[in-house]
Image (cartoon, rainbow, N blue to C red):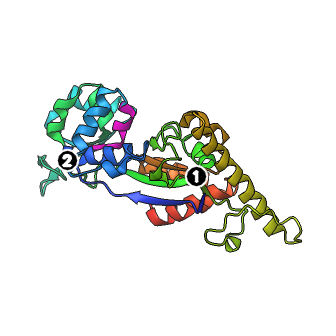
Amino acid sequence: MKLIEASYEILPSHGYTLPDIYKDIERAGRTCYKSENKITEDSAEPFVKMIMERKHTAVLEQGTVYLYFPYLLYNNTVLKYEHNPYSKVEFNSNIIWGENGEKKCIPLGYGYAGYYITTNYRVIIENHWESDLTFICEPTEYHQKRISVRFICSRAIANELVRHRVFSYCQESSRYCNYSKEKFGANITYIIPYWINKDLIKDNDFSGDVFQDTENKELVKLGRFKASLKQCEYDYLELIKNGCSAQEAREVLPLCTKTELVMTGFEKDWKQLFELRTSNAAHPDMRNLIIPLKEKLKF
């Protein structure tokens, strides 16, 4: 078995074009089955087509789409995004005024009068708005931005994160990931909780000793923790060996089992998450994960 610390990684977008959006979707989507090793220069578009054929369209939410509609084109095209709960519309008037206060003109082009829309690829596909992709553009200062973060954390913390329903999620699936396979090292990875003294953990020392005869309570807690996890791993592997599927064997795994989670959301949604998950009432493991992320993003 392996013991690791929770971590996060801010995922930069590959870009704003349709091929770039496909790559963002594939990167997040392959987290579910831990098949990142299948990513190649040309694998993104076939992956997205496969996802659509299987109607797993939730994964398409990981592809952020930025659109620009000139001022003169305001009609039902823009209105439909204003009524869509998963899209954000910003209007920039940027009118040029004459010396005497008269309105001279409304220039067209990025940075001028128009509607700056942020949405996701699932919205485009499920509503059959593919023709709007002709208005795709590089994100500007007028667009509301979406940010993607990959978390490596415990199942317990992931269960709390997915309660923020305004985000888009892709999570490692313990139903399909068979941890007895060589790609996972034929072992279970666990997240070290806040109440374990990390300084006492020795590299590759997972003997499961319970340290019953010591007066050092930190050693006792560590020993009990390791012994319990070792037993869970043994039971999981034995269940697999005796014919259980991964989704059946996972029933014996504890809440500190490692999972990976890609979350994508608007900046204002991240701000709300930070407010809730960095407060003193939040779980210590959550605070240890989210506070550094908040400081890194610096909204």
Of the two numbered discs 2 and 1 on the same chain, state the one appearing first in sequence.
2
Q: x and y percent of residue 144 in the render?
A: 34, 48
Q: Quick one: label 2, few (<14), some, or many (20+) residues within 10 Å?
A: few
Q: Distance between the residues labelled 2 and 1?
A: 32 Å
Q: Is 276 situated above or below 134?
A: below
Residue 42, numbered label: 2
Which quadrant does the N terminus fall into? bottom right
Say what amino acid the circle numbered 2 marks: Asp
Q: Nearer the viewer, residue 253 or 29?
A: 253
Report whether 158 appears left or right of 177: right
Q: Mark 2: which secondary structure?
A: loop
Give the quarter of the image for residue 215. bottom right
Q: x and y percent of residue 74 in the render?
A: 19, 33
Per the image, the residue denoted by label 1 is 188
Q: Give the range drawn in magenta.
A: 57-65
Q: Is 284 situated above or below 93?
A: below
Q: Is residue 80 visible?
A: no
Which quadrant does the C terminus fall into? bottom left
Q: Which of 284 and 99 is in front in this view?
A: 284
Q: Is residue 261 visible?
A: yes
Q: Determine the residue positioned at 23% across, 26% down.
A: 76
Give the main secondary structure, helix, strand or loop, of the magenta stretch.
Answer: helix
Q: Mark 1: which secondary structure?
A: loop
Magenta stretch containing residue 285, yes or no? no
Q: Determine the residue positioned at 24% across, 53% down.
A: 15
Q: x and y percent of residue 41 in the render?
A: 21, 52
Residue 147, numbered label: none
Magenta stretch containing residue 59, yes or no? yes
Give the quarter of the image for residue 45. top left
Q: x and y percent of residue 263 in the render?
A: 45, 47
Q: Determine the residue positioned at 27% across, 29% down.
A: 125
Q: Determine the residue positioned at 50% across, 43% down.
A: 178
